[in-house]
Image (tube, rainbow, N blue to C red):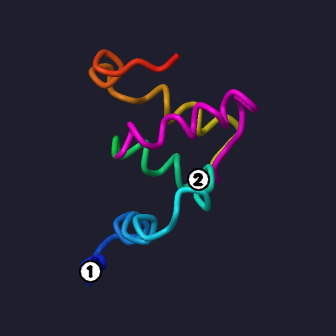
């Protein structure tokens, strides 16, 4: 499915990422989708692995922006899901 014609850059990026295998996703790709609170069950194991190796790994904004995206995940998600 393609993004609608007059979509924002973010919407177009999300549609592009849906076609890309997860093994090719960058920290920035992960950060963007996590900030949208989408596909967290699939993405968090990947992100937590990357953060365990380097807590300050980053997307395109600043050192630690991926960690900041994880910290911003809604509290209800954490209550319903266990990651250890």
Principal secondary structure, stretch drawn in magenta? helix
Q: Is residue 62 above or below residue 64?
A: below
* Cβ atoms at labels 1 and 2 below 8 Å apart: no
Q: Determine whether, in the image, residue 33 is placed left or right of residue 74.
A: right
Residue denoted by label 1: 6
How packed is label 1: few (under 14 Cα within 10 Å), some, or many (20 or more)? Answer: few
Residue denoted by label 2: 28
Q: Is residue 50 above or below residue 76?
A: below
Q: Given the current orientation, which residue lies at the most extreme right position? A: 54
- Pair 1/2: label in front: 2
51 magenta-colored: yes
Q: Tell me the residue at 67%/37% (across/down).
A: 50
Q: Tell me the residue at 60%/38% (across/down).
A: 65
Q: Determine whether, in the image, residue 72 is placed left or right of residue 50.
A: left
16 magenta-colored: no
Q: Position of residue 69 (x, y in %)?
A: 50, 36
Q: Determine whether, in the image, residue 82 is placed left or right of residue 64.
A: left
Q: Determine whether, in the image, residue 43 is placed left or right of residue 3.
A: right
How packed is label 2: few (under 14 Cα within 10 Å), some, or many (20 or more)? Answer: some
Q: Position of residue 11 (x, y in %)?
A: 34, 66
Judged from the image, the secondary structure of the residue bearing numbered disc 1 is loop
Task: Say which of 80 and 66 sits in front.
Answer: 80
Which quadrant is the N terminus positioned in? bottom left
**Mark 2 or mark 1, which is nearer the start of the sequence?**
1
Q: Position of residue 56 (x, y in %)?
A: 72, 32
Judged from the image, the secondary structure of the residue bearing numbered disc 2 is helix
Q: Position of residue 16 (x, y in %)?
A: 43, 71
Q: CA distance from mark 1 to mark 2?
A: 23 Å
Magenta stretch, residue numbers: 39-60
Task: Say which of 26 and 10 sits in front.
Answer: 26
């Amino acid at each position: 499915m393609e993004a609608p014609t007059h979509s924002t850059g973010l919407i177009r990026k999300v549609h592009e990422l849906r076609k890309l295998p997860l093994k090719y996703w960058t920290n920035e790709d992960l950060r963007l989708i996590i900030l949208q609170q989408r596909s967290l069950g699939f993405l968090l194991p990947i992100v937590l692995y990357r953060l365990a190796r380097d807590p300050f790994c980053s997307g395109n904004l600043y050192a630690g922006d991926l960690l900041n995206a994880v910290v911003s995940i809604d509290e209800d998600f954490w209550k319903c899901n266990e990651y250890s």
